[in-house]
Image (cartoon, rainbow, N blue to C red):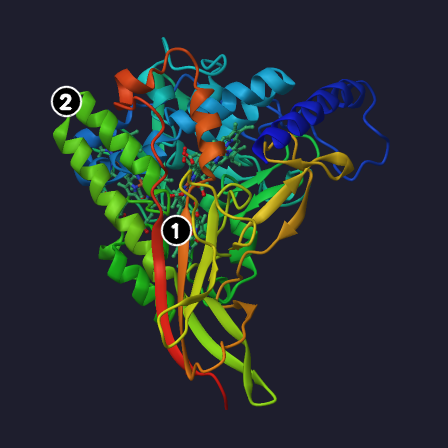
Amino acid sequence: MVKKLKLVSLITAALVTACSVAVAATTPAGSPFKVDHELFKLYPSLIVYEKSKAGFTEPETCGGCHEDKFKEWNGSLHSMAFVDPVYQGELNKAVKAVGHDISRQCEGCHSAAGVVTGEIKGPGLAGLSAVARAGVSCDICHSISALNHDRTPTKEPENGSFVIKPGEDAKDGSVLIKRGPAKPQDGCGDGFHECRQTEFHDKADLCASCHQVFHYEKHFPIEATYNEWKHSPYAQKGIHCQDCHMVATETFVKAADTMQKPERKDYRHYFNGANYLLYYLGSQAALKAGDKEQSGRLMAQYDMAVKRLQKAAELEIEPVYRKGALSEVRVRVKNMRAGHNLPTSLTNIRQMWLEVSARDDKGEVILSTGALGADGALGDDARLFNSDGMGTDMHFAVDPWVITAFSRHETIPPKGYRDVYYGIAAPKGSSRITFEARLRYRQADQKIAEALLKAVPKDIDLARDYGLSGIPSLPVVDMVSLKREVTATK
Ligand code: HEC
Ligand code: HEC
Ligand code: HEC
Ligand code: HEC
Ligand code: HEC
């Protein structure tokens, strides 16, 4: 299957390149997506940079005074957002497919400081400053001074639509200004920076424009975590991204179950999500570099991500009888605690699926679906909850510069569920059937992960930096499982 896909996406990529040249020359009049290029100088990133003599500060420097926050952030994927080898592999492919301009879109979210200063020139890490490599660092979030939601082409947050301003010019040089949720106390910043309060640092609005990835030209929402959240019961009850992702596991569970906000003292800079694979890679790299403490922090986040996934969903198994005989089984998958669809973000890459089996009273398997093959491939019969992307002309596609629509989008809405029915007939003489269902998750299809890691730029050496001699089978997490015995007749 993957071979075919590659060819299709190559052809589509070639078509897209040809088209984009034409589009640039003649932006269609009355296009719904007019772009204000005066405002959005870094387009296709929608970041607006308010430049002054005040530069960006390395996270280690902030950590000199805010030690706990530094340690928490340093084990997060925000700290890996630019050096992430999976990201670098895809960026490399993007630039080769559609040209260098697209890299501003990617880097706007993965290393905003690197793109606004013009330092990053393309894929690769060689020669870059610590600030550029630090990805989504302290000085990105705390230098965001305003949001541009209402001025974007789609009038929605997308592709980094914020204003970034690390400081201002002053009589004798410059002054750093850091922004946060609290009203500044006297001495805030200890002479290193001034403090300003914003309306949005403790709200989803801060996260919105980076957690909405729209196609770089067509503005199709490929990842729409913020919009999913915005139209959910969580948004209506005031439970924001921070209330689940910037707290410990028990606190997030309580916020999701009771719709009560955590207390002020409970917030941590974990930004913990679901990508346990990247925490694992990061921790291997830290070990290789001889930093056991950092490796431990990343493994603690790995455990947290696995636990988060295991708290997200619940299952139900219900038999369906027709004319007194068992004819189907209904498996219900409920999104209990994800504040957005389950899964979210890269829904066309992530895999969440049901593995279901049934045995008769002799223990013989009479139904089996969704099991992984020996090569890590998922059978065609597996019921996946995710999406399929496509380019123009309904071509299947996985790359974000190609995807301008979804052919299928079957994620589970917040506090909602999806039902899957499996036809079944009890063998003659069987009186009881035992069903077993497992909801499973992994970051990507094995072949897709292999292709991405093979595309990493030359200055990342997976064996030297990550201790990877080949690409091992991607680990699968069992989010939840359930067993139920039912009678063959009713
Ligand atoms: C609007 C902000 C934004 C833009 C623009 C953006 N990304 Fe991302 N990217 C994200 C976020 C947020 C995630 C994390 C999603 C998740 O893990 O669920 C992510 C995740 C990824 C991942 C998965 C990383 C992993 O380790 O699994 C890859 C690969 C990636 N991005 C590549 C790109 C490329 C290439 C581009 C440009 C074509 C791009 N991104 C543009 C925000 C963005
Ligand atoms: C992804 C965005 C993001 C990044 C990156 C980030 N922060 Fe924060 N920070 C926040 C948010 C959101 C809050 C408010 C959370 C809360 O309510 O305490 C916050 C709060 C703070 C506060 C005020 C805490 C309080 O108790 O009032 C400090 C200080 C701070 N961050 C420092 C840092 C430092 C230092 C780093 C880097 C090591 C960092 N932040 C990285 C988003 C970020
Ligand atoms: C010389 C010490 C020092 C350094 C370096 C420092 N800060 Fe602070 N910062 C403080 C103090 C003191 C406060 C007030 C007490 C607190 O919140 O910890 C503060 C407060 C803050 C707040 C809370 C503002 C609010 O009103 O909610 C943020 C956000 C913040 N700092 C971010 C940063 C970032 C980002 C960096 C690095 C660019 C940084 N700080 C570097 C000392 C420092
Ligand atoms: C400047 C852009 C930016 C901002 C602002 C931002 N993020 Fe992110 N975030 C990213 C990128 C890029 C990644 C993916 C890094 C990677 O996987 O390479 C990410 C990853 C994450 C992840 C990990 C996802 C996973 O699959 O495990 C979580 C959770 C997260 N962000 C939450 C937040 C929250 C909560 C906020 C607001 C307080 C926020 N982010 C603000 C860009 C941003
Ligand atoms: C009620 C709690 C809750 C809220 C609110 C919430 N999340 Fe999540 N988030 C979760 C859970 C649980 C998961 C793990 C399951 C999953 O992947 O969806 C998750 C996963 C994620 C992931 C990783 C997705 C993946 O599979 O790679 C990202 C990125 C993310 N959230 C960002 C956000 C952002 C941005 C917001 C605010 C707009 C937000 N979340 C609001 C609970 C929450």
Q: Residue at x 79, y 23 (%)?
A: 23
Whole-percent x, y for residue 282 in the image: 28, 31
Q: Are marks 2 and 1 in contact (CB under 8 Å)?
A: no
Element at badge 2?
loop
Q: Residue at x 42, y 84 (%)?
A: 431
Q: Which mark is residue 290?
A: 2
Q: Which mark is residue 444?
A: none
- Occupied quadrant, residue 256: bottom left
Q: Amino acid at mark 2?
A: Gly
Number of numbered callouts drawn = 2
Q: Residues within 10 Å of mark 1 (few under 14, many from 20)?
A: some
Q: State whether residue 349 is above or below residue 6.
A: below
Q: State whether residue 437 is above or below residue 384.
A: below
Element at badge 1?
loop
Q: Which one is nearer the viewer's eye here, 315 or 287?
A: 315
Q: Which one is nearer the viewer's eye here, 357 or 91?
A: 357
Whole-percent x, y for residue 219 in the image: 67, 37
* Discs 2/1, front: 2
Q: In the image as oriented, which residue stretches furthest toward the top?
A: 127
Q: Which residue is mark 1?
A: 202
Q: Residue at x 45, y 13 (%)?
A: 119
Visible residue check, residue 98: yes
Q: State whether residue 394 is above or below residue 284.
A: below
Q: Which one is nearer the viewer's eye here, 401 or 478?
A: 478
Q: Amino acid at mark 1?
A: Asp
Whole-percent x, y for residue 32 in the image: 78, 40
Whole-percent x, y for residue 304 in the image: 26, 50
